[in-house]
Every structure is written in structure tokens, then in C-alpha cells.
Image (cartoon, rainbow, N blue to C red):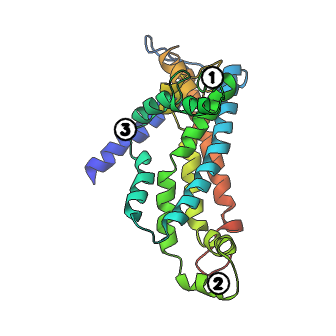
Amino acid sequence: MAPAVLGVLLFSIGPMIASLWLSLTSYDMLSAPEFVGLANYVKLMGDKLFLKSLSVTMLYAVVVVPGTMLAGLVVAILLNAKIPAMGFFRSAYYLPSVIGGVAVARVWAMLYNTDYGLFNLILGLFGIDGPGWLTDERWAIWSLIFMGIWGFGGTMLIYLAGLQGIPKDLYEAAEVDGAGKFRQHLFITVPMLSNVTFFNLVMGIIGALQVFAEPFVLTGGKPNNSTLLLPLYLYRVAFTYLEMGYASAIAWVVFAITLVLTLLVFRSLPLWVHNEAGED
């Protein structure tokens, strides 16, 4: 166990403790850290750019998390049917989840290109002038959101595994009672997958608050900071402005937000997650 324990201490717990200490200091990597107490956290409350990035991140998370879960569930239900070449379709839908973020972002950058991108070329066929997906402030964040929802492969795979565990006789009994497919999925599939939904919700929240590669490659926070998600702002503060103490404070605020949202989801668990005894 020693290598694993040392790895956690040196590369996880150690850096976290160092980051917490640095968040209480003024540190630019060129001189020794100077203790300033809670000044960095107080500064955050009046930092308009931080508040802007917080609102952008919340919008991203509020749309992407349920959008990804809904898309994953619908596609999982479709892929759970017995149709030809099912293995191919399952692999195709899951593939985006295992491709590197930078590579995927570069592909989407070409798709979103205003002059020769596929999306605007398709719109042009119908006489529509496509927008500047990544250069127009009104469209940029929604372009990132659409790309985020597109990567629902991991969520879909987990839902698909959950579907395999639902007893078939429940659907057969519902069909005998005259329930159609929609009602079967609404009153059987959704409740029986509540444990899976809970897991996907927690992981989705954590992932949405930490997304970095895609906005960094596609927009860099532009235009007019409309895509400046919190991890991107943290990176800018740390490695552009060299304000490591302030960046550490931002990191701990992101951690606190993630922790609070996760705890709220856990507290709501008895209200909607189906337990082993068959009760809600």
C-alpha cells in the first residue's frame, strides 16, 4: 500500500494543503509568499470578472448537466432495443467520451468556423446566414453548451448498464395492464434508474464545474468574457497575472461550490431515489 499512500499524500493531499495556505497569501512565484489572511476571499466578493465567470459557469452547468442526462437516457433506451449492428451504435455514441478534450475541441472549432464550418454551410443551403458561433457574444456560450451536451457517451453507457438490471416482467405486467411505451418508461424505467440518475447527477455537477480544455481551446474566454468559465479564469489569474495566492482562493471557492451542490443532492436522495425495498 505504501506507493499508493505516498502518491495520494504527495500529489493530492499535499498540494491541497499547499493551495489552502497559498490562498491566504500574496504570491507571484517570484518572491516568498506574504501572509494576507482572508484578503483574497474578500477581494473575490468585489471582483466583477470573478462574478461574471461564476454566472457563466452556473449557466453552463444548469443546462449541460440535465441536457447530458436526458440525452444519455433517451439514447440508452434506444440502444437497449434489439436492432442490427447494436454494438457499432453503442461504440459510436460512447467514442466522444474517450477522445481527448483538445482533439475534440479542434474538430468543433472547424465545425463552428464562420466561413467554412459545416454548420454554417448547412444553414447556407437554406438561405440562412450562419452566426459567428464562437465570435458572437450571444452564441459563444451556447456553442460550448451544445458541445458539452454532445459528450453524453459516458452518461449513456452508465444508463445502459442500469437498464440491463431492470426486470423484464415489470414491463410485461405494465403492457398487460394497457400501458404504452411512454408510460412504461415514465413509471418503470425512470424510477428504477433513480440510483443511476443520482450517480450521473453528482458526476455531472463535478464535471461541469471543472470543464477547462474546451473553452480554453475554442474561445479562451472570449468574446467579452462571455465564455469565461471559472477554471479558465483561475488559469488566467494564475499563469497570466501570476497571482498564485488569488488563484488558490478561486480554486477553493470552486471546491466549496462543488461540495455544497453535491451535499444538497445527497440530502435530496430520500425524496426521489428508489431504494432496495422498493419504496421511494
Q: Which residue is mark 1?
A: 40
Q: Which residue is mark 3?
A: 11
Q: Is residue 22 above or below residue 3?
A: above
Q: Which residue is mark 2?
A: 175
Front position in the image: 182 or 186:
182
Instruction: Count how many numbered circles sit on residues in the image.
Output: 3
The quarter in which the N terminus is drawn is: bottom left
Q: Amino acid at mark 3?
A: Phe
Mark positioned earlier in the residue sequence (2 or 3): 3
Q: Amino acid at mark 2?
A: Glu
Mark 2, residues whose alpha carbon is within 10 Å: few (<14), some, or many (≥20)? some
Q: Is residue 273 above or below residue 12?
A: below
Q: Is residue 77 above or below residue 38?
A: below
Q: Nearer the viewer, mark 2 or mark 3?
A: 2
How far apart, in angstroms, are the residues tagged by discs 2 and 1?
61 Å
Give the residue drawn at x 60%, y 81%.
171
Give left or right: position of 261 versus 242.
Answer: right
Mark 3, residues whose alpha carbon is within 10 Å: few (<14), some, or many (≥20)? few
Instruction: Name which quarter of the figure residue 112 lies in.
Output: top right
Mark positioned earlier in the residue sequence (3 or 1): 3
Q: Amino acid at mark 1?
A: Asn
Front position in the image: 93 or 154:
93
- Does dot 1 land on a helix, a strand or a loop? helix
